[in-house]
Image (tube, rainbow, N blue to C red):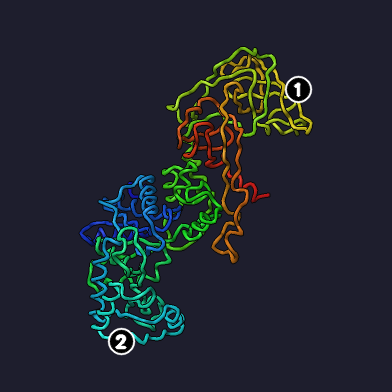
Amino acid sequence: MSDTESKEPLNFIEQIIEEDLKNGKHGGVVHTRFPPEPNGYPHIGHAKSIVLNFGLAEKYGGKCNLRFDDTNPEKESSEYVEAIKRDVEWLGYEWHGNALFASDYFDRLYEWATELIKKEKAYVDDTPVEQIRAERGTPTEPGKESAYRNRSVEENLTLFSEMKDGKYPDGAKILRAKVDMASPNMHMRDPILYRIRHVEHHRTGNSWCIYPTYDFAHGQSDSLEEITHSLCTLEFEVHRPLYNWIIEQLEIFPSRQIEFARLNLGYTIVSKRKLLQLVEGGYVSGWDDPRMPTLSGIRRRGYTPNAIKNFIHKVGIARRDSITDVALLEYSIREDLNKTTNRVMGVLDPVKLTITNYPEDRDEELTAINNPEDESAGTRKLPFSNEIFIERADFMEDPPRKFFRLGPGREVRLKYAYIIKCEDFKKDGDGNITEIICTYDPDSKSGQDTSGKKVKGTLSWVSAKHAETVEVRLYDRLFKTENLNEIEDDFLNHLNTDSLSTLDNVKVEPSLKNAQAGSRFQFERQGYFVVDQDSGDTKKIFNRTVTLRDNWAKQSRK
């Protein structure tokens, strides 16, 4: 196979870039940017844009800016700015130079707006916003021109200056582009460029009381930074003619806007407005709640940057919106953690098991493999004694024939230890099993077995004498409806009320006593877990990252 044949196929954006490089466009420079609004925490949808923009810059030896579109001070804050920076860095990327802000360009944007007025391409409008909406027309009917559309250049310059100086209250006047009220593209029907907002800005304070709209600030910020490929999601496709129109009118650097399909994930909300509603309504504990699709949430849940990147690459870059199965994200984290995460013993629902013929005063150290997928991970010592904990679900009083775990008279192997046989069990007044009585075969020690016995079941366990007690939080999908884009009622009606379960008596092996926040482990036969960042000194908290298998797929087949 030739080198050309072995390469992965290029997505359509890479094809555009390679054609531009071939033609020497922009001197062979590739310069992208990630331009978030600092009005919420980044979510999994933003990860696609981050990986795409920074990844393309890396691939083609270019540059990628981090620029905040901070033109709406009512909803923005420095908290969100820092969260975005933190998440970009967590994914492993470095932006070119310093972090940039649209507010860095407020003076230049104001000058350009003034230039449009002088070219008779913009005007100050006193029409109330509600009336402007009504006069825009419909996709099949032209809009109505404003009564203020033909103000003189001098009057518009004066009024715009007075707007800047704070002479008028919010909503009294706006600046509109003078394009075409009969355009089939509604966004070209004299769109708003500036509005009055007497609101303190998180960076500029009260220096400004007029703020540019996204449509005006975005393309010009791209041009100022000489962004060669301005990548955005498909909903901005109808904004592209205005993007290009303003650049052409101002005769500035011709950045090119290219649209790609956003990431729509099953059982997931990626609207920052709705995510904020979840936070403010107390439906979750905060932006970093492990059930949230925010990068801070999934980081706290134990997801890795590598898993996120692999997931984005699996999804691919397309021109058409679709719903991505959340199982693909869960598969990606399993795939990554399987290779990199050490195995440990953890019993979520413990029941005591006593081995009557094992000496009470004897402690034994057994050898356990840390990660069968990674020989370099080595081994560890696992303490064993006559009293252990096993999972309650691993014992049945009257098991069916194909139940290969423990039951009266049955034998199973304790992983890395011995073969045991159930001789008896005890129950409380409510019929719950309180203790399982077993014997062990001294000749069946793992790795040294001379018993000749063959058993089908292997159980996880923890020595009762040496166990650490921890809290485990089992997280599930936050919503019970797959395609939340198609629902007609309140999205809150689709919350999964069983998305969080807390277990406060989980027994784990002693090697986890000093596990640090953020450390990841696979509990044998249970799933992947991470030490929570909020774990206290008295009892550690483990968040379940993901189960070992897709349990939702099983449920959907029932």
Residue marked by disc 1: 424
x%, y% of residue 194?
33, 72
Residue at disc 1, secondary structure: strand
- Residue at the image position 79 percent from the left and 31 percent from the top: 429
Could you give the CA–CA distance between mark 1 and mark 2, rounded to whole angstroms? 95 Å
Q: Nearer the viewer, residue 338 or 118?
A: 118
Judged left or right of residue 186, residue 4 is left
- Residue at the image position 54 percent from the left and 56 percent from the top: 281
Q: Amino acid at mark 1?
A: Asp
In the rendered image, the vertical position of residue 2 relative to residue 404, given as above or below:
below
Q: Name which of mark 1 and mark 2 comes first in the sequence.
A: 2
x%, y% of residue 192?
36, 75
Judged left or right of residue 9, residue 368 is right
Q: Nearer the viewer, residue 58 or 121?
A: 121
Q: Amino acid at mark 2?
A: Asn
Residue marked by disc 2: 150
CB under 8 Å between discs 1 and 2:
no
Callout 2 environment at 10 Å: few (<14), some (14 to 19), or many (20+)?
Answer: some
In which quarter of the view is residue 176 placed? bottom left
In which quadrant will I find the N terminus?
top left
